[in-house]
Amino acid sequence: MADPVGAGTRFPPDPGGAASPVSLTPAAAELIRSLRGRHGPLMFHQSGGCCDGSAPMCFPAGEFRTGGSDVLLASLAVDGVPEPVEFWMAKSQWQLWKHTRLTVDVVPGRGSGFSLEAPDGLRFLIRSHLTPTPPP
């Protein structure tokens, strides 16, 4: 049987875990507010695939089916958006990026994906920053 919508691993796995690894730039927050006004509640998913699969894709909440191969990295609070915006990533991609802090930003341009911002001539992207590795 298929995993239900919203199934998957939640970050952090323990209640006393680290802070969210995902943040937003002011430009990304502004675009999210605009998209929320047009499309309702939103979510992000980043697959880690090639080409546009390595960019965060924005969908109406629940439209992208998550499952056991995905990790919920953050429930982002955005001023002016009444509900959190979930940010999911493929578990295999998170294994490669787990030592980074991710910042969702927006730049001019059109990707070839199905992300909601594409018709606006904009695209979301991730800016990553390595986090210090704790001593052994």
Image (cartoon, rainbow, N blue to C red):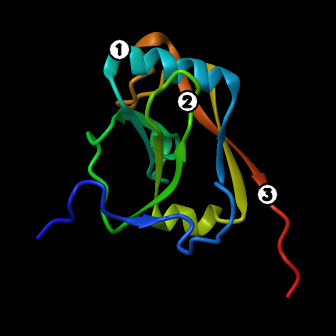
Residue at image position (34%, 30%) is: 114
Which mark is first along the chain, 1 or 2? Answer: 1
Answer left or right for 125 relative to 132.
Answer: left
Q: Which residue is mark 2?
A: 124
- Furthest toward the right, the residue is 135
Q: Residue furthest top?
A: 120
* 30 left or right, relative to 86: right
Residue name at image x 71 percent, y 53 percent: 101
Location of mark 1 (residue): 38
Can the viewer see residue 109?
no
Whether 39 is drawn above or below 13: the answer is: above
Instruction: Check the image and report above or below for 1 versus 72.
Output: below
Task: Give residue 122's position: percent from left, percent from top.
Answer: 53, 17
What's the amino acid at mark 1?
A: Arg
x%, y% of residue 45?
A: 43, 46
In the picture, which quadrant includes the N terminus? bottom left
Query: How far is the residue under mark 2 from the one under mark 3?
Result: 20 Å
Viewer-side residue, 30 vs 100: 30
* Total number of numbered discs in the rendering: 3
- Tag 2 secondary structure: strand
- Residue type at mark 2: give it: Phe
Amino acid type at circle 3 is: Leu
Among the 4 quarters of the image, the one containing residue 15: bottom right
The spot of residue 62 in percent (x, y) is: 28, 42
- Which disc is residue 51 wearing? none
User: In this rendering, does residue 122 appear at all?
Assistant: yes
